[in-house]
Image (cartoon, helix red, strand yellow):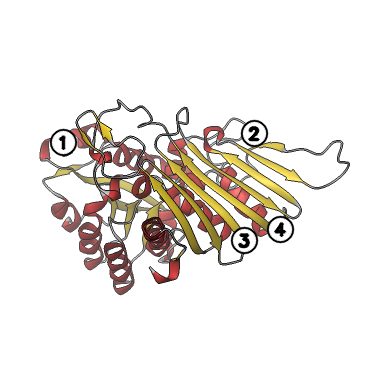
Amino acid sequence: MTDLGIGIVGGGYMGKAHAVAMSAVGAVFDTKLRPKLRAVAANSIETATRYQLAYGFEKACENWEDLVTDQNVEAVIIATPQSTHRRIAEAAFALGKPVFCEKPLATNLEDARAMVAAADKAGVVNMIGFNYIRTPASQFARRLIQEGSIGDVTWFRGMHEEDFLARPDDPFSWRCEGMANGNLGDLSGHPINAALALMGPIEKVSADLETVHKQRPGGEVSNDDHASVMCRFSNGVMGHLYSSRIAMGRKMGYAYDIYGTKGAIRFDQEDQNALWLYEDKGSRATQGFCKILTGPEHPDYQPFCLGRGHGTGYQDTIIIEAKDFLRAIETGKNVWPSFRDGLAVAEVVDAIQKSAQSGAWALVQQV
């Protein structure tokens, strides 16, 4: 076993999740690299010190520059607003340090492409955080599709629905200003990532965006509340993507339906330890969706628990990400999803915005 010094920029919601994951991953997966929480940086030294004491870091840094250049920090995790991602990543790559960056990769397509270019030039391991697709159930769904268990796929529908801004009187916040912070910039990346992971590249999109609640207490909303997107995949399959922050009643509505010539798959993150599988076999009188409870037979489940149906949770998906990041560093080879995969999501987002503005189909390869 070899120690690996970890520095995390940002210690809030996602910074804490990654700190916990890096503290636990060695024990859960018996990794050869054992992360050590060397340093944390935040928007002030006072905040960083609070995170240091709460999560067990060795050091609190005055700013992210001090963290990146610290010789004891051998890999960097970026868990800050997307507008800061490019500068931090480029600085780490220049020093040859692997980088894990939370989604979305950047505020705009130009910055996302620059980050991929910097990673490629440095030849350094890089990874982006899309954790929901890492549940044992979704990993198993991906395997079923690849193995042809539901035949040739004929239709895909992916969603990410939440209701944190569903009420018209929910107050104005930073999420209500700027397209990068709206539904399209914030939530849509998850169903897009799921679509790319399960179905492959998207060829073209036809999209409509809407701001339902244009005024909120405290300000005027300048970004979208929800997005509806028709899409055509490069393999010829039709599909639909939907994301919303005003889906009343939905708390974690990351879900998908996939139809094939021999069966179908359904998944809903609100019941993340179950996968629904339909197989066109036997008598029609007894056919129906089968609820598969995840267990040790499914990807990345057994290290957490030996009991079927006992389940994994949100934090466990972050630990799985940590395991994959460590494996990439150990082998010197990127694992999915890399910055380039994050760029693929950004390109689809850009095509969706162009389609919504023009009212016409937009080819992803032309963004």
* Alpha carbon distance from label 2 to label 1: 41 Å
Badge 3 amino acid: Val
User: Considering only vertical position in the picture, is 201 above or below 121?
Assistant: above
Q: Residue at x 33, y 56 (%)?
A: 105
Mark 3 element type = loop
Q: Nearer the viewer, residue 294 or 230?
A: 230
Q: Earlier in the sequence, mark 4 or mark 1?
A: 1
What x and y, as percent, mark residue 14? 32, 41
> What's the residue type where badge 1 is placed?
Thr
Mark 2 — residue?
308
Quote the CA–CA distance across marks 3 and 1: 48 Å
Q: Nearer the viewer, residue 351 or 258?
A: 351
Q: What residue is at 42 percent from the left and 60 percent from the top?
A: 348
From mark 3 to mark 4, how far is it between C-alphas?
Answer: 15 Å
What amino acid is found at the position of numbered circle 2 in the picture? Arg
SS under mark 4 = loop
Residue 148: mark: 4
**Sequence order check, earlier mark of 3 and 1:** 1
Q: Which mark is residue 47?
A: 1
Instruction: Residue at 54%, 51% (x, y): give it.
Output: 240
Callout 1: SS? helix
* Badge nearest the viewer, 4 or 1: 4
- Separation of residues labelled 4 and 1 (CA atoms): 50 Å
Whichever of callouts 2 and 1 sits on the residue coming sooner in the sequence is 1
Q: Is residue 157 visible?
A: yes
Which numbered tag is attached to residue 237? 3
Is residue 291 placed above or below 328 in the rendered structure? above
Rounded to the nearest whole Å, what is the CA distance between mark 2 and mark 4?
Answer: 25 Å
